[in-house]
Image (cartoon, rainbow, N blue to C red):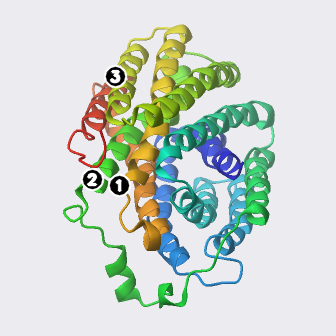
Amino acid sequence: MAYLSLHVAVMTPLLASLAIRLEQVDPAGKESALGLVVGAGTLVGIIVGPVIGMLSDGTSSRLGRRRPWMLAGMPVLAAGAVLAAVIESVPGVLLGYLVMQLGVSAIMSPLLAVMPDRFPEEQRGKVGGLLGFSAQIAGVAGFQFAGALSGSALLLFLVPALVACAGVLLLVFMLPDRPAPVSGRRRLDLRSLGRDLAFDPRRHPDFGWAWAGRFLIQFSLMFLTTYQLYFLTDHLGYELSEVTDLLVITGGVGLVVTSVGAVVSGYLSDRLKRRKVFIYVAAVCFVVGFVSVASASSFTGVLIGSLCILFGAGVFGAVDLAVVTDVLPNRETEAAKFMSVFGVASALPQSAAPLAAPFILGVGGGGNYPLLFLVAAGAAVLGGLSVRPIRGIR
């Protein structure tokens, strides 16, 4: 429930609310502004997330290692949502999103560590499938919030944030969480902090390849999630009021196919004790889906391609979480640190893809969405192939 509710607050801005808000405050420069806001906001998460993860591993509070950080992040998330909604300028939206990302990072880093903390290898595929399923439900909920609350900027940002706080608070009350032992405590020294956060993929190559695969798949997916709304309005000519309804349809049907992909692949991966084949299947789905979207002349083509991509995302999300948990270095003492570093592979594309997209869209005179989605397909191919060198899984 915490994972689902937090992803409501993560996905709603990425899928709809930031695009809607920036069109309100800067309609002429909305595409560049969206890239700036998403990119800069995500950069904050990339920097802050691993730091909080490492500190969480060494937290010796009576509340435990994970819960104090979750509690601290909730008011920060809500405050950022209010700022993004009430300040009538691009810098104001950017400021609010930066604060939101601080709150999300404080919650997400310890939350990601719960899986390696508590689940054995034979359950990781199933748990990963359920978590992937939860993230997809959050995306559908994000579209629903966008359609229902688009008339009020404050509600559009604040309601998803409050949903996240409610779900996380439930986990805080229910989670058995022991404090770190005295030997696990860390001093707040900047030089040692930077050294501890450094990750050498040569020492842990399996983890490095898993990180690269997650980055490439998420990089490709971000092109769709961030620019799908503008593709339908600017390239295919739909009205904004129509698009929010169409995206609800995509999200609703996509929930079914993503759920099937996530839950079934997670279950089969545990039963067959194989991970790589499911990553390959996911990459193929991404390629077929992006080619379909790139060549679409109507919403029907976009829907078919999006559903194929969402099925692949479900398959990948479930098995990928199991892969990284299987190859996680120093699981007993540094789970939150390494899961936060792995989380950067999801967060970095949220910054890199929107920053790269305007340059791709500008090829040929501007608005080159077909090329954008073909680039996404190429990234997905590389992401699927990245699991081949991993030796710790089959």
Check contact, mark 3 vs mark 1: CB within 8 A: no
Category of crowding for the residue at label 3, using alpha-carbon neighbours closer than 10 angstroms: few (below 14), some (14–19), many (at least 20): some
Viewed as shown, does residue 302 lie left or right of 385? right
> To which residue does mark 2 refer?
206
From the top left corner, tell me how far across and down residue 235 is, in percent.
48, 19
From the top left corner, tell me how far across and down residue 373 is, in percent.
37, 26
Q: CA distance from mark 3 to mark 2?
A: 22 Å
Three-letter amino acid code of the residue under disc 2: Asp
Q: What residue sits 23% from the left and 47% below the top?
A: 391
Q: Nearer the viewer, residue 169 or 93?
A: 169
Dot 3 or dot 1: first in sequence order is: 3
Q: Is residue 340 above or below residue 360?
A: below
Q: Which mark is residue 284?
A: 3
Q: Is residue 50 visible?
A: no
Viewed as shown, does residue 343 lie left or right of 130? left
Category of crowding for the residue at label 1, using alpha-carbon neighbours closer than 10 angstroms: few (below 14), some (14–19), many (at least 20): some
Q: Depth-wise, is mark 3 or mark 2 nearer the camera?
A: 2
Judging from the image, what secondary structure is the residue with disc 2 in? helix
Dot 2 or dot 1: first in sequence order is: 2
Quadrant where the image shows the C terminus: top left
Dot 3 or dot 2: first in sequence order is: 2
Q: Residue 374 appears in which quarter of the rendering? A: top left
Three-letter amino acid code of the residue under disc 3: Val
Q: CA distance from mark 2 to mark 1?
A: 6 Å
